[in-house]
Image (spheres, helix red, strand yellow):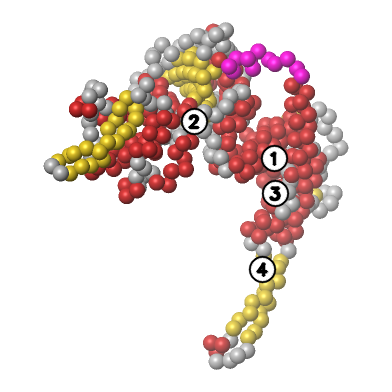
Amino acid sequence: YFKSTLSKYSEQSRKRKELTDSKATAIFHVDMLHLDTENSISIETEKHYDSRYIDEECRKIQVFSDTLEALKHHISQAKNSYKILPNPVIQNRYEQLDVFYFRDIREISKRIQSCPHDEKWLVFTDDEKDGARLDAFMEEREIDSAFLSRDTINKTGRPKKEFKNVVEKQKFDSHVLIATSIMDCGVSIHDPAVKHIVIAHSNKATFLQMIGRKRLDKDERVNLYIMLETERHIHGIRYQLEKQMKSLCRLGLVENFDYEQIGPDTWTDIRETPYLSPVEIRLAEDVFHSEMGRRLIYPAKNSPVEKRKTFMYGYQISETAFLSILYDLSDYIEALDEFHDSKDPYFFLKRQLSWLGKEYDEQKWLQYGRVKMEIAELFDKYCASGDSPKDRIWIRKNEQDEFAYKCFALLLSLPEMPKTLKRHCDRFGKPKKLPGKELLNKALAAYHLPFKVSSKSRTVSKGVRETCWYVEKIS
């Protein structure tokens, strides 16, 4: 598979070099009418292809398509073989997880503040900036927290102490422990006080490893909070993986030929004219010296002595890195294909839930509970204090629009509309055309709230009758 990918990338590199080196003849037709003549002239000139045109032509040579199709076949076979094996114990533990969803890390910070102090939180994030921001937020509110990353655990202080606690005691002292993927494997946490796990990560292997850090006892239940990954973010991850694959291919192409430096900035092949442009050779060397490069190569076991030394001398491409990138890339491409077919904004969330054997439930969003409470409080204000019609709080015709607007303003703050109301979304938020009591009652039924909006014609003044609304409690 690597040879297949490498050959495609070689073809793409040759095309780029060919278009970069060649010149295009362009013919411009100049109209001479403004010079009081009906003639026109043609001017020939030479110009270089612009970078956009070169990129478009190179993209026509698909680097990964054939390789991914072949890989998917073997991944599918491996999954089918895995099904006949006994399920690991951790698979059964997924039933002990109560799963919730959220959009932004700020929602988690509010949830942490409202939870009992004796319940600990374990928060995983793939972005160090988000982790540092949440840690700062906890510090501002005097909530005991620690942030573990590759940088912080090597420094003296709370993070280093907490990391040592996790490794040696399988516990942590702080109320909230925030960590990057540095803690996704190799450590276990045996602490019944850890009741909440937050995961903001999209990689399947890392996602499942993060859940497995907390060892669950029999009948123990834990809340799991999954962050919504948007289609744009998944596209960004796919782009980064393709970038890593291209870097791997650059190093692989350089590894296949020898060259020597004949000047301060000039490289040439000692055997044949290289099909890599000087720019790509320079980019390959930049990759070699980067942090990414250290993950893509490893020292070669047997380096031929007769081979002329280059920056790849003594090193070879990591097959493990190639397979890992290719596997992740195929997974993200498959997910994006699902999105393009379904246009479902929660496509990746549902994919993550399937890893746990769970199904999507629109009422599991964190904001649902808060909004339900606010809707209940609003209806309680209008609810009759007794069973007699005299005790009812009547909502007159000129007040009904304001009442409906308040209700649906709360519904608009939900992460997702109830299914019963989705087809009426185009009417929400428009004071001139607000939904009536029938849709209000559908919303109340969707949230399982014990209220109902009814109407009755009654005399409001001498000789004037109106259809008024009132709120009643139902079983």
The image quarter containing residue 291 is: top right
Q: Residues within 10 Å of mark 1 (few under 14, many from 20)?
A: many
SS at mark 3 in the image? helix
Mark 4 / mark 1, whichever is N-terminal: 4
**Which amino acid, mark 2?**
Glu
Q: Mark 4 highlights which residue?
A: 47
State whether residue 430 is above or below residue 457. Answer: below
Residue occupying the point 58% across, 21% down: 210
Residue occupying the point 56% across, 40% down: 344
Q: Mark 3 highlights which residue?
A: 280
For the residues bearing labels 2 and 3, Cβ distance under 8 angstroms: no
Q: Mark 1 highlights which residue?
A: 245
SS at mark 4 in the image? strand
Magenta residues, start to end: 84-95
Spatial CA span between label 4 and label 1: 32 Å
Spatial CA span between label 2 and label 1: 37 Å
Q: Mark 2 highlights which residue?
A: 362
Residue 428 picture location, percent across and down: 38, 44
For the residues bearing labels 4 and 3, Cβ distance under 8 angstroms: no
- Left or right of 79? Residue 426 is left
Spatial CA span between label 2 and label 3: 49 Å
